Image (tube, rainbow, N blue to C red):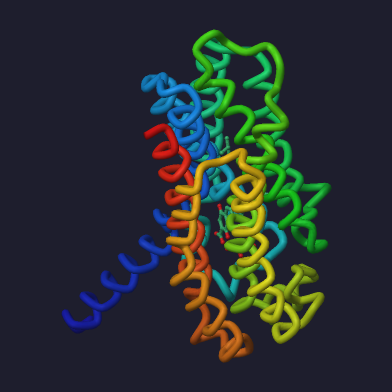
Amino acid sequence: MVEPQAVASRYADRRLLWKAAIKWPMYSVAVMPVLLAAGWRIGAVGSLRWTQLFGFLLAAILLLLWENLSNDLFDADTGVDTTGKPHSVVNLTGRRDRVALASLASLGSGLALMAWLAWCSSVLVLALVLLCCGLGYIYQGPPFRLGYRGLGEPLCWLAFGPCATAAALMVLEPQGANVIPWATAWMLGAGPAVATSLVLFCSHFHQVSEDSAHGKRSPVVRLGTARAAALIPWLVALTLALEWLPMCRGDWPLTVLLSGLGLPAGLALIRLMQRCHDQPDRISGSKFLALRFQAWNGLGLALGLALGRL
Ligand SMILES: C/C(=C\COP(=O)(O)OP(=O)(O)O)CCC[C@H](C)CCC[C@H](C)CCCC(C)C
Ligand SMILES: O=C(O)C1=CC(=O)c2ccccc2C1=O
């Protein structure tokens, strides 16, 4: 007979695994481009299209859900998640078919919502979002799997930086713009997208041996954990430099200094990774510390831009 305590602990373990699989703080990376675009619009024009804002937020969440479910599906094919990721949704459910269905449903509904937003603004919005999804696909899907060659971070930067930010700016534009606002999108998206790519970079440290055993040459596998950890202070500094440069040039208000709200988490991340970069058990949560940096930094920047109106 199975002991009630053993059953209870198995349920508790499963609950924790599901929590790790859902990883709700990760959705901060999906919502940031439109929150930044909203902060910028309030600062520049003083008005916002609220329905479009909420529509974009929901669609971006659905698309990131697709990216993560399909990541578990593709990683199940290469075997990279078999030992190191018990919280893969494929491992947890044992039902590849259902995960594939859920993944397609989130892609379909996310794109349908984006298509409606494009209908209300410009068809270019849909083109940009499809580009983001394409970047997400070549990161992990066959035959490309560029993430396995260490190219995930630049793809991540492009998708969550200029591309998603340009789409969000266009959706919030009342008249429906016909030109992609690349200059604003680069200026607004560049710094926060470095912070988003830092999340991905930090997610590789604790699984370096599984990745290397399965031929996944992540940047951390390529550089080694010590050299990779030495890059983190530079990435934190680059995030802030790209955000504060427009302020130094007089393009943005002094209130964008609020993006420094991410600094306590950024500094804690730098210290942790310098000390423990080669101890998987101690740094398995480092991507969530990087997420705290990304979230506070992005929210501070969005708020700083909006407050510039006052
Ligand atoms: C799925 C991603 C990372 C997980 O990678 P990895 O396989 O190393 O993780 P595990 O070891 O835990 O399995 C993120 C990849 C990001 C990608 C390059 C870009 C995605 C773009 C989104 C689909 C676009 C979202 C919409 C936009 C409008 C906000
Ligand atoms: O599961 C992960 O490690 C990540 C999932 C994800 O969607 C994402 C998006 C953008 C940057 C990093 C990450 C992850 O690390």
**Is the residue 37 above or below the residue 222 in the image?**
above
At a point 49% along the width and 63% down the height, the residue shown is 293
At a point 62% along the width and 35% down the height, the residue shown is 164
From where the camera sits, is residue 65 visible?
no
Question: Where residue 199 sits: x, y (%)?
Answer: 58, 62
Tell me the quarter of the image containing the C terminus: top left
Question: Where residue 149 sits: x, y (%)?
Answer: 82, 62
Is 8 or 220 nearer to us in this picture?
220
**Is the residue 122 above or below the residue 160 in the image?**
above
Q: Quadrant of residue 133?
A: top right
Is 107 or 268 nearer to us in this picture?
268
At a point 79% along the width and 57% down the height, the residue shown is 151
Count of numbered tags = 0
Name the residue furthest left: 4
Tell me the quarter of the image containing the N terminus: bottom left
Is 244 placed left or right of 56 in the picture?
Answer: right
Is 6 placed left or right of 31 in the picture?
Answer: left
**Is the residue 226 above or below the residue 172 in the image?**
below
**Is the residue 87 above or below the residue 113 in the image?**
below
Is 224 placed left or right of 293 in the picture?
Answer: right
Question: Where residue 40 sits: x, y (%)?
Answer: 51, 33
Question: Where residue 258 sits: x, y (%)?
Answer: 44, 54
At a point 39% along the width and 39% down the height, the residue shown is 307
From where the camera sits, is residue 4 visible?
yes
